[in-house]
Image (cartoon, grey):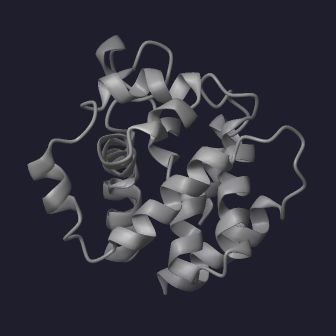
Amino acid sequence: MQTIAQIFAQSGQDEYYGEPVTQLEHALQCAQLAEQAGADDETVVAAFLHDIGHLFSVESAEGYMDGYGTVDHERLGADFLRQRGFSEKIAQLIEHHVNAKRYLVYKHPEYRARLSEASTQTLMFQGGPMTADEAAQFEQNPYFREILQVRGWDERAKEIDLPTPGIEHYLALCERVRR
Protein backbone atom coordinates (compact mmCIF):
# COMPACT_ATOMS: atom_id res chain seq x y z
CA MET A 1 0.00 0.00 0.00
CA GLN A 2 3.06 2.19 0.23
CA THR A 3 2.95 2.89 -3.52
CA ILE A 4 -0.70 3.97 -3.34
CA ALA A 5 0.04 6.09 -0.26
CA GLN A 6 2.95 7.73 -2.11
CA ILE A 7 0.77 8.48 -5.14
CA PHE A 8 -1.79 10.22 -2.95
CA ALA A 9 0.97 12.01 -1.00
CA GLN A 10 2.40 13.32 -4.27
CA SER A 11 -0.81 14.22 -6.12
CA GLY A 12 -3.75 13.84 -3.74
CA GLN A 13 -3.91 17.55 -2.96
CA ASP A 14 -4.25 18.40 -6.65
CA GLU A 15 -7.55 19.85 -7.76
CA TYR A 16 -10.15 17.31 -8.78
CA TYR A 17 -10.53 18.67 -12.29
CA GLY A 18 -13.16 21.39 -12.42
CA GLU A 19 -14.63 20.47 -9.02
CA PRO A 20 -14.40 22.15 -5.58
CA VAL A 21 -12.48 19.26 -3.94
CA THR A 22 -9.02 17.71 -4.15
CA GLN A 23 -8.29 14.33 -5.69
CA LEU A 24 -7.91 12.83 -2.20
CA GLU A 25 -11.12 14.39 -0.88
CA HIS A 26 -12.98 12.99 -3.89
CA ALA A 27 -11.52 9.51 -3.35
CA LEU A 28 -12.31 9.51 0.38
CA GLN A 29 -15.86 10.77 -0.17
CA CYS A 30 -16.52 8.19 -2.86
CA ALA A 31 -15.29 5.38 -0.61
CA GLN A 32 -17.33 6.69 2.32
CA LEU A 33 -20.48 6.75 0.16
CA ALA A 34 -19.80 3.12 -0.79
CA GLU A 35 -19.40 2.16 2.87
CA GLN A 36 -22.56 4.02 3.85
CA ALA A 37 -24.45 2.11 1.13
CA GLY A 38 -23.27 -1.20 2.62
CA ALA A 39 -21.03 -2.12 -0.31
CA ASP A 40 -18.63 -5.04 0.05
CA ASP A 41 -14.96 -4.32 0.73
CA GLU A 42 -13.84 -4.76 -2.89
CA THR A 43 -16.44 -2.25 -4.06
CA VAL A 44 -15.39 0.23 -1.37
CA VAL A 45 -11.75 -0.13 -2.50
CA ALA A 46 -12.80 0.38 -6.12
CA ALA A 47 -14.72 3.51 -5.12
CA PHE A 48 -11.64 4.78 -3.26
CA LEU A 49 -9.24 4.09 -6.14
CA HIS A 50 -11.53 4.65 -9.16
CA ASP A 51 -9.66 7.79 -10.27
CA ILE A 52 -6.10 6.78 -9.33
CA GLY A 53 -5.20 6.89 -13.03
CA HIS A 54 -5.66 10.68 -12.91
CA LEU A 55 -2.75 10.85 -10.46
CA PHE A 56 -0.16 9.32 -12.78
CA SER A 57 2.25 11.47 -14.77
CA VAL A 58 1.49 11.61 -18.47
CA GLU A 59 4.21 11.89 -21.10
CA SER A 60 2.56 14.40 -23.45
CA ALA A 61 -0.26 16.93 -23.74
CA GLU A 62 -2.29 14.39 -25.76
CA GLY A 63 -2.60 12.41 -22.52
CA TYR A 64 -4.84 15.07 -21.00
CA MET A 65 -8.46 16.06 -21.62
CA ASP A 66 -8.10 19.86 -21.96
CA GLY A 67 -7.45 20.38 -18.26
CA TYR A 68 -10.00 17.79 -17.11
CA GLY A 69 -7.71 14.91 -16.30
CA THR A 70 -5.95 12.01 -17.92
CA VAL A 71 -7.20 10.30 -21.06
CA ASP A 72 -7.99 6.63 -20.32
CA HIS A 73 -7.46 7.16 -16.60
CA GLU A 74 -9.90 4.33 -15.92
CA ARG A 75 -7.85 1.79 -17.90
CA LEU A 76 -4.54 3.08 -16.53
CA GLY A 77 -5.82 2.75 -12.96
CA ALA A 78 -7.31 -0.71 -13.49
CA ASP A 79 -4.11 -2.02 -15.10
CA PHE A 80 -1.98 -0.49 -12.34
CA LEU A 81 -4.03 -2.29 -9.69
CA ARG A 82 -4.13 -5.61 -11.57
CA GLN A 83 -0.31 -5.51 -11.66
CA ARG A 84 -0.30 -5.08 -7.89
CA GLY A 85 -2.48 -8.09 -7.13
CA PHE A 86 -5.91 -6.50 -6.77
CA SER A 87 -8.90 -8.56 -7.86
CA GLU A 88 -10.44 -8.50 -11.29
CA LYS A 89 -13.66 -7.24 -9.71
CA ILE A 90 -11.90 -4.12 -8.40
CA ALA A 91 -10.20 -3.62 -11.76
CA GLN A 92 -13.48 -4.00 -13.66
CA LEU A 93 -15.33 -1.53 -11.42
CA ILE A 94 -12.59 1.02 -12.04
CA GLU A 95 -12.10 0.26 -15.73
CA HIS A 96 -15.80 0.69 -16.49
CA HIS A 97 -16.85 3.65 -14.34
CA VAL A 98 -16.46 5.94 -17.37
CA ASN A 99 -18.48 3.50 -19.48
CA ALA A 100 -21.18 3.76 -16.82
CA LYS A 101 -21.42 7.51 -17.48
CA ARG A 102 -21.62 6.89 -21.23
CA TYR A 103 -24.28 4.23 -20.62
CA LEU A 104 -26.39 6.40 -18.33
CA VAL A 105 -26.32 9.32 -20.78
CA TYR A 106 -27.50 6.94 -23.52
CA LYS A 107 -30.13 5.10 -21.44
CA HIS A 108 -31.43 8.10 -19.47
CA PRO A 109 -30.90 11.32 -21.46
CA GLU A 110 -31.95 13.39 -18.43
CA TYR A 111 -28.83 12.05 -16.65
CA ARG A 112 -26.66 14.30 -18.82
CA ALA A 113 -28.32 17.40 -17.34
CA ARG A 114 -27.30 16.24 -13.84
CA LEU A 115 -23.61 15.93 -14.74
CA SER A 116 -21.21 18.56 -13.47
CA GLU A 117 -19.60 20.85 -16.03
CA ALA A 118 -16.32 18.91 -15.78
CA SER A 119 -18.07 15.57 -16.21
CA THR A 120 -19.97 16.90 -19.21
CA GLN A 121 -16.74 18.13 -20.80
CA THR A 122 -14.92 14.83 -20.28
CA LEU A 123 -17.81 12.87 -21.81
CA MET A 124 -16.74 14.13 -25.23
CA PHE A 125 -13.19 12.80 -24.73
CA GLN A 126 -14.59 9.51 -23.47
CA GLY A 127 -16.59 8.61 -26.55
CA GLY A 128 -19.89 10.35 -25.84
CA PRO A 129 -23.08 8.44 -25.14
CA MET A 130 -22.99 4.71 -25.86
CA THR A 131 -24.67 3.26 -28.91
CA ALA A 132 -27.49 0.75 -28.47
CA ASP A 133 -25.07 -2.10 -29.24
CA GLU A 134 -22.48 -0.84 -26.75
CA ALA A 135 -25.17 -0.47 -24.09
CA ALA A 136 -26.50 -3.99 -24.65
CA GLN A 137 -22.98 -5.39 -24.34
CA PHE A 138 -22.22 -3.30 -21.24
CA GLU A 139 -25.38 -4.60 -19.53
CA GLN A 140 -23.88 -8.11 -19.77
CA ASN A 141 -20.88 -7.24 -17.57
CA PRO A 142 -21.11 -9.42 -14.44
CA TYR A 143 -20.38 -6.34 -12.31
CA PHE A 144 -22.86 -4.08 -14.13
CA ARG A 145 -24.84 -3.12 -11.00
CA GLU A 146 -21.72 -2.34 -8.95
CA ILE A 147 -20.19 -0.34 -11.81
CA LEU A 148 -23.30 1.87 -11.89
CA GLN A 149 -23.09 2.27 -8.12
CA VAL A 150 -19.46 3.42 -8.32
CA ARG A 151 -20.52 5.91 -11.00
CA GLY A 152 -23.26 7.30 -8.78
CA TRP A 153 -20.89 7.74 -5.85
CA ASP A 154 -18.35 9.31 -8.21
CA GLU A 155 -20.89 11.96 -9.22
CA ARG A 156 -21.85 12.72 -5.61
CA ALA A 157 -18.35 12.78 -4.07
CA LYS A 158 -17.69 16.48 -4.60
CA GLU A 159 -18.73 18.13 -1.32
CA ILE A 160 -16.60 20.88 0.20
CA ASP A 161 -15.23 20.09 3.69
CA LEU A 162 -17.18 16.85 4.12
CA PRO A 163 -15.82 14.86 7.09
CA THR A 164 -14.60 11.39 6.04
CA PRO A 165 -12.43 8.66 7.50
CA GLY A 166 -8.76 9.32 6.79
CA ILE A 167 -6.69 7.77 4.05
CA GLU A 168 -5.21 5.26 6.52
CA HIS A 169 -8.65 3.68 6.94
CA TYR A 170 -8.95 2.97 3.21
CA LEU A 171 -5.30 1.98 2.76
CA ALA A 172 -5.82 -0.67 5.47
CA LEU A 173 -8.90 -1.89 3.61
CA CYS A 174 -6.84 -2.05 0.40
CA GLU A 175 -4.28 -4.19 2.20
CA ARG A 176 -6.97 -6.57 3.47
CA VAL A 177 -8.65 -7.10 0.10
CA ARG A 178 -5.37 -7.53 -1.76
CA ARG A 179 -4.28 -10.51 0.31
* Total tally of numbered discs in the picture: 0
Say which of 30 and 87 sits in front.
30
Instruction: Give coordinates of residue 104: x percent, y percent.
Output: 38, 48
Corner quadrant of residue 66: top left
Q: Where is 107 relative to 172, above or below?
A: above
Q: Residue furthest left?
A: 133
Instruction: Give coordinates of residue 136: x percent, y percent.
Output: 15, 60
The answer to whether 97 appears left or right of 34 in the picture is left
Say which of 59 and 112 sits in front.
112
Q: Which residue is drawn at the image coordinates 41% and 58% (left, top)? A: 94
Corner quadrant of residue 63: top left
The answer to whether 63 appears left or right of 120 in the picture is left
Q: Where is 93 relative to 95, above or below?
A: below
Instruction: Give coordinates of residue 143: x percent, y percent.
Output: 33, 74
Q: Which residue is drawn at the image coordinates 74% and 73% (left, top)? A: 36
Looking at the rendering, in which quadrant would you find the N terminus? Answer: bottom right
Q: Which residue is drawn at the image coordinates 40% and 53% (left, top)? A: 97
Residue 107 visible in the picture: yes
Q: Which residue is drawn at the image coordinates 47% and 41% (left, top)? A: 111
Say which of 138 and 175 sits in front.
138
Residue 3 visible in the picture: no
Instruction: Give coordinates of residue 48: x percent, y percent.
Output: 60, 60
Q: Where is 43 relative to 25, above or below?
A: below
